[in-house]
Image (cartoon, rainbow, N blue to C red):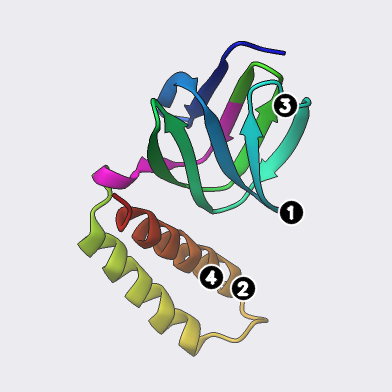
Amino acid sequence: MADELKLEIVTPEKMAFQGIVEEVTIPGTEGQFGVLKGHAALLSSVDIGELSFTQDRKKTYYAVNAGYAEVTATKVTVLVETAERYDLIDRERAQKARERAQEKLAKLSREDVEFEKVRVALLRAIARLNVAGKT
């Protein structure tokens, strides 16, 4: 069994986080899943939502966009489009984005080509607001 669990959260622009953690919880497309040191290897797609990890008994939260997670017994690598730490999220901006997306969705039918794009924008805004409320 591994002694440590290393976590890397990577976006196209930067390494959002890199460090040793006790556990990590990831919003997988098939449902949320947790990883502890010594976990079986797996590859999963990541959904828009809340990623959290515990480091030195303190929980940290990120709002993440879609991507992939690779898990080994000693390392978790999360490759996502965006990752925003809870304390760096602009709540007012996220609230306005949610309102805009809700207004647009109300005017679109599911068959409209813009529907999925706006739905995803709404999910991202909701995830950002949920994570921004964490302490």
Helix, strand, or loop for circle 4? Answer: helix
Of tags 2 and 3, the one toward the viewer is: 3
The x, y position of residue 11, in whole percent, is 47, 32
Q: Distance between the residues labelled 2 and 1?
A: 25 Å
Number of the label disc, if any, that sits on residue 39: 3
Give the magenta-colored segment's residue range. 77-87
Furthest-front residue in this view? 57
- Give the left or right position of residue 132, taking residue 36 as reference: left
Q: Earlier in the sequence, mark 2 or mark 1?
A: 1
Q: Nearer the viewer, residue 95 or 105?
A: 95
Marks 2,4: beta carbons within 8 A: no
Q: Name the residue under label 4.
A: 119
Marks 3,4: beta carbons within 8 A: no
Residue at horizontal 49 percent and vertical 28 percent from the top: 10
Marks 1,4: beta carbons within 8 A: no
The x, y position of residue 80, in whole percent, is 54, 38
Is residue 13 magenta-colored? no
Residue at horizontal 50 percent and vertical 44 percent from the top: 51
Q: Earlier in the sequence, mark 2 or mark 3?
A: 3
Number of the label disc, if any, that sits on residue 113: 2
Compared to residue 22, the image places residue 111 above or below, namely: below
Number of the label disc, if any, that sits on residue 134: none
Helix, strand, or loop for circle 1? Answer: loop
Q: What secondary structure is the stretch in magenta mostly built from?
A: strand
Compared to residue 96, the image places residue 71 above or below, namely: above
Helix, strand, or loop for circle 2? Answer: loop
- Give the left or right position of residue 108, taking residue 103 as reference: right
- Give the left or right position of residue 30, taking residue 32 as reference: right
Residue at horizontal 47 percent and vertical 88 percent from the top: 106
Q: Name the residue under label 1.
A: 30
